[in-house]
Image: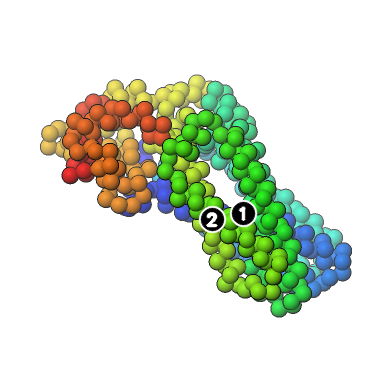
């Protein structure tokens, strides 16, 4: 374990979620925009419509600047925040999928070089060659999604990896293909919505109208296909994860997703019917609404992993929940319950390793930070704060809190308490103090 990252009001995981959600906007643009660009460019050459090249140039510039500047920076932000929020989880992913990421980075290099070559050679090389450059970029960028989705799906449903430890046993798990199909469908919808925003800046009204109609069709088809594959994805979830959908309080998140999809769908229909009334501010608002829907979707996807970071293997507080003989990894629960969590975690002040009457409260707060802060804010307010939680449950005395902690493992969305009975009483003292 590394030093803990305590985030006031917001939890470390919530910060990671905000950065990761923003990253989806440029990253899904990078994987989808060139498919639409190549489609329009092909029509421009086949139908002898050079005026369409103005849009292609502008859309490629958006891709170059937005996707590969903000996308790259937010991608680094994900790595940094994930490393400090869950160092053992990142370590586990790297040990299992370092070659997967290495492969993804090769295609990422193809993307970075490809978009610059594509943009700066438009109109300077033969159309046939330029289209090939576009296809190389489009396929290469989508391949990065093919790889990353495998790692994301693994974190929810590791599949046979829990027995074999095999790369592909974890990668091609039961939720992989439904999630890939769902993300790919919504990817094309996002491409259409961005294309509409770019089209609003084109002065040629005929070109503007043509691009908007084509983009709205891409968006409508992408949303319909994405919704269908979303239900396939839900069906592929294990029973435990489907149960969490009914237990966890996700009503507001679900409503945000429905409202976002409904608005965007109606917006795309309006674009198809009346493209001339769509202005840039309206197009920007639609992108903001997409962000809200994506954020809610990603929040639910993260919540479905509870109480694990890796399904049935590593708890959300980064302790190992299950033996993995193929990797030589042992369950840590019994060992921590025997020797104590304050003895196991390296970065513990020496005066708190042994609990005494005078340091019991401080030790309890540190244990809460170690075991609870990945999901909860320790203050009065914020993301799932502990104080309202213990008040709602009625934990107002140390004895009540101690009994609740002893039974917490029966909750389907919370890890069990790890540590000795003495450490559990210290945490109970701290939790009961919050209620007062």
| Residue 116 in view of the camera | no
Instruction: Name the image quarter holding residue 343.
Output: top left
Residue 95 drawn at (x, y percent): 52, 35
Instruction: Name the image quarter holding residue 206.
Output: bottom right
Vertically, is 320 above or below 33? above
The quadrant of the image that shows the C terminus is: top left
Residue name at image x 38 percent, y 43 percent:
375
Instruction: Give me the C-alpha separation between circle 2 and circle 1.
Output: 21 Å
Mark closer to the observer (2, 1): 2
Residue name at image x 69 percent, y 61 percent:
216
Is 88 left or right of 141, judged from the image as shown? left
Question: Are circles 2 and 1 on residues that touch, CB within 8 Å?
Answer: no
Q: Secondary structure at mark 1?
A: helix
Residue 143 drawn at (x, y percent): 68, 46
- The one nearer the camera, 365 or 83, is 365
The quadrant of the image that shows the N terminus is: top left
Residue 40 drawn at (x, y percent): 77, 63
Q: Which residue is label 2 attached to? A: 259
Which colour assignment does the render follow? rainbow
Is 56 left or right of 279, judged from the image as shown? right
Vertically, is 11 above or below 175? below
């Amino acid at each position: 374990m590394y030093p803990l990252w305590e985030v006031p009001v917001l939890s470390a995981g919530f910060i990671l979620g905000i950065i990761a959600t923003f990253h989806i906007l440029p990253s899904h643009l990078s994987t989808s925009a060139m498919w639409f660009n190549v489609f329009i460019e092909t029509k421009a050459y086949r139908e002898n419509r050079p005026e369409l090249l103005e849009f292609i140039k502008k859309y490629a510039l958006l891709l170059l600047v937005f996707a590969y500047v903000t996308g790259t920076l937010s991608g680094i932000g994900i790595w940094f925040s994930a490393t400090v929020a869950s160092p053992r989880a990142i370590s586990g992913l790297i040990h299992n999928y370092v070659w997967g990421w290495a492969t993804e980075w090769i295609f990422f290099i193809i993307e970075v070089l490809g978009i610059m070559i594509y943009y700066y050679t438009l109109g300077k090389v033969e159309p046939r060659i330029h289209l090939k450059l576009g296809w190389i970029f489009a396929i290469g960028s989508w391949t990065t999604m093919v790889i990353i989705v495998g790692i994301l799906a693994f974190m929810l449903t590791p599949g046979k990896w829990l027995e074999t430890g095999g790369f592909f046993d974890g990668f091609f798990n039961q939720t992989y293909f439904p999630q890939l199909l769902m993300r790919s469908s919504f990817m094309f919808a996002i491409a259409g919505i961005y294309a509409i925003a770019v089209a609003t800046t084109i002065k040629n009204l005929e070109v503007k109208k043509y691009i908007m109609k084509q983009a709205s069709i891409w968006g409508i088809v992408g949303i319909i296909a994405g919704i269908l594959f979303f239900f396939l994805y839900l069906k592929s979830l294990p029973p435990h994860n489907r149960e969490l959908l009914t237990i966890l309080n996700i009503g507001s998140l679900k409503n945000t997703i429905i409202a976002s999809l409904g608005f965007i769908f109606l917006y795309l229909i309006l674009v198809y019917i009346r493209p001339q009334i769509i202005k840039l501010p309206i197009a920007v608002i639609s992108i903001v609404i997409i962000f809200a829907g994506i954020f809610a979707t990603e929040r639910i996807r993260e919540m479905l992993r509870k109480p694990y970071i890796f399904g049935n293997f590593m708890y959300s507080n980064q302790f190992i929940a299950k033996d993995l003989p193929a990797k030589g990894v042992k369950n840590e629960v019994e060992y921590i319950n025997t020797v104590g969590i304050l003895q196991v975690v390296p970065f513990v002040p020496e005066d708190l390793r042994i609990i005494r009457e005078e340091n019991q409260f401080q030790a309890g707060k540190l244990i809460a930070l170690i075991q609870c802060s990945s999901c909860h804010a320790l203050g009065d307010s914020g993301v799932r704060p502990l104080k309202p939680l213990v008040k709602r449950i009625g934990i107002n005395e140390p004895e009540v809190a101690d009994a609740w902690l002893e039974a917490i493992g029966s909750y389907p969305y919370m890890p069990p308490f790890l540590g000795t009975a003495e450490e559990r009483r210290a945490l109970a003292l701290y939790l009961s103090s919050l209620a007062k």
